Image (cartoon, rainbow, N blue to C red):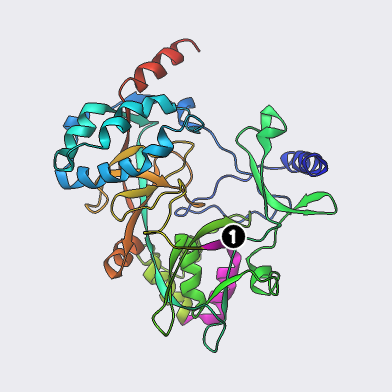
């Protein structure tokens, strides 16, 4: 109770100042200079203008594409039909998904397109103008123990990192969250990247493993999961387990804005090369991204998305759950061929914020790394929702 009260008081002070907008990967939001605790302002898809899109049968969906999406959707069904599920987008309710989830268990995967045509309709959120990036499961050199050449700690989530949903304290704070730690009964900001890299968490037994290359580990943090491969061939799979509450800063945009990289060079490969060519300046630049990701070791089949289920390459996408129901299929029609087709919203990301913003997952390996690292696509997005969703929205809108 004392902590809750101090959180409310500290949060009220922060809310009196400017509210930090949600970070984005590309374009990125500059790091806040505020010493307060980071707050995310969230709206909902249900509060935006929605339009009913074309029928699913009119979309360019191949059977192969539909098959992968069906398998991914099937995986998500236990979460979709959970009566305690909360759809932050405001578009759906758990019972809406019951019929589709009941039949998907036995649906013929070779006729997957018919499944989506039978059970879903399409919605366009706002103008539907979409931006898609890509992510993958990186594989970098690592070790369970510290040894020469393996000096970069991979930290587990600290016990004193606190996540606070401010809607618990006042209705006007609905959708606002803070992260920090409690010090002398007050919620204060957590250590930033510079402090952590300088040893703020050292000696607490939080080291899961040790990475060999600080640049490779920096990009693994952006991806949110990956594989550490030891000199002996042991593979340690790690996944996202929290963030320190500081704003994410996309260093590619910084390099572009400062004229150090041309627009076409500001992809993962180009950024990494610049960092290696400019080691001192590069280290300082990485530290300007104050956001820091914590991990846990994974033992299941494939990296886990934020729904708690394994994500699958070329089928799963990260979204902002305030604008896309988690577990919902999404159809992308972009200016690049690779991301076109059906995806299932099974993950989130600190940099994936706003309507029609997607981060497509490409799996592991060199092909996945190449596609994801260079992915920057624009086009149109449609959300697939259970039939009847738009009619309910239209009725509610008419009463406003």
Residue at 52% across / 77% down in the picture? 144
Name the outermost residue toward the top: 399
Quarter location, residue 74: top left
The residue tagged 1 is 291
Name the outermost residue toward the front: 106
Residue at 43% across / 51% down in the picture? 305
Left or right: residue 47 versus residue 387 is right
Residue 151: give x, y in percent of width and height. Answer: 57, 82
Residue 76: give x, y in percent of width and height. Answer: 37, 41
Q: Is residue 58 above or below residue 393?
A: below
User: What crowding class fits label 1: few (fewer than 14 Cα within 10 Å), some (14-19), or many (20 or more)?
Assistant: many
Q: Is residue 227 visible?
A: yes
Query: Disc count in the image?
Result: 1
Q: Is residue 92 visible?
A: no
Q: Nearer the viewer, residue 358 or 267?
A: 358
Left or right: residue 245 versus residue 185 is left
Residue 388: give x, y in percent of width and height. Answer: 33, 19
Residue at 64% across / 72% down in the picture? 197
Q: Nearer the viewer, residue 32 or 70?
A: 70
Q: Which residues are magenta?
A: 277-296
- SS at circle 1: loop
Q: Is residue 141 above or below residue 107?
A: below
Q: Is residue 17 above or below residue 224?
A: above
Residue at 45% across / 31% down in the picture? 45
Q: Nearer the viewer, residue 104 or 214?
A: 104
Quarter location, residue 173: top right
Residue 173 included in the magenta stretch of the image: no
Left or right: residue 72 versus residue 186 is left
């Amino acid at each position: 109770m004392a902590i809750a009260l101090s959180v409310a008081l500290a949060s009220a002070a922060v809310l009196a100042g400017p509210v930090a907008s949600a970070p984005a990967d590309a374009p990125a939001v500059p790091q806040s200079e505020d010493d307060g605790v980071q707050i995310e302002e969230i709206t909902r898809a249900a509060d935006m203008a929605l339009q009913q899109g074309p029928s699913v049968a009119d979309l360019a969906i191949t059977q192969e594409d539909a098959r992968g999406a069906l398998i991914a959707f099937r995986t998500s069904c236990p979460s979709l039909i959970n009566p305690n599920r909360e759809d932050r987008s405001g578009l759906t309710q758990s019972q809406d998904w019951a019929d589709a989830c009941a039949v998907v268990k036995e649906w013929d995967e070779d006729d997957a397109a018919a499944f989506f045509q039978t059970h879903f309709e399409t919605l366009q959120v706002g103008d539907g103008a979409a931006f898609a990036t890509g992510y993958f499961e990186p594989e970098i050199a690592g070790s369970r123990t510290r040894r020469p050449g393996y000096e970069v700690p991979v930290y587990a989530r600290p016990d004193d990192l606190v996540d606070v949903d401010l809607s618990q304290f006042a209705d006007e704070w609905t959708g606002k969250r803070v992260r920090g730690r409690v010090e002398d009964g007050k919620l204060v900001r957590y250590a930033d990247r510079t402090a952590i890299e300088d040893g703020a968490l050292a000696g607490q037994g939080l080291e899961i493993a040790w990475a060999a290359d600080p640049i490779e580990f920096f990009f693994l943090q952006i991806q949110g999961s990956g594989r550490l491969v030891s000199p002996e061939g042991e593979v340690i799979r790690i996944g996202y387990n929290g963030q320190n509450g500081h704003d994410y800063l996309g260093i590619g945009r910084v390099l572009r804005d400062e004229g150090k990289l041309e627009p076409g060079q500001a992809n993962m490969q180009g950024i990494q090369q610049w960092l290696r060519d400019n080691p001192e300046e590069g280290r300082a630049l990485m530290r300007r991204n104050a956001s820091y990701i914590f991990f846990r070791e994974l033992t299941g089949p494939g990296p886990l998305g934020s729904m708690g289920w394994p994500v699958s390459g070329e089928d799963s996408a990260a979204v902002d759950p305030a604008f896309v129901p988690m577990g919902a299929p999404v159809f992308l029609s972009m200016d690049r061929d690779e991301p076109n087709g059906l995806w299932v919203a099974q993950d989130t990301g600190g940099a994936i914020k706003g309507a029609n913003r997607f981060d497509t997952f490409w799996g592991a390996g060199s092909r996945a790394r190449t596609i994801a690292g260079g992915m920057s696509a624009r086009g149109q997005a449609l959300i697939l929702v259970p039939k009847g969703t738009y009619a309910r929205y239209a009725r509610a809108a008419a009463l406003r």
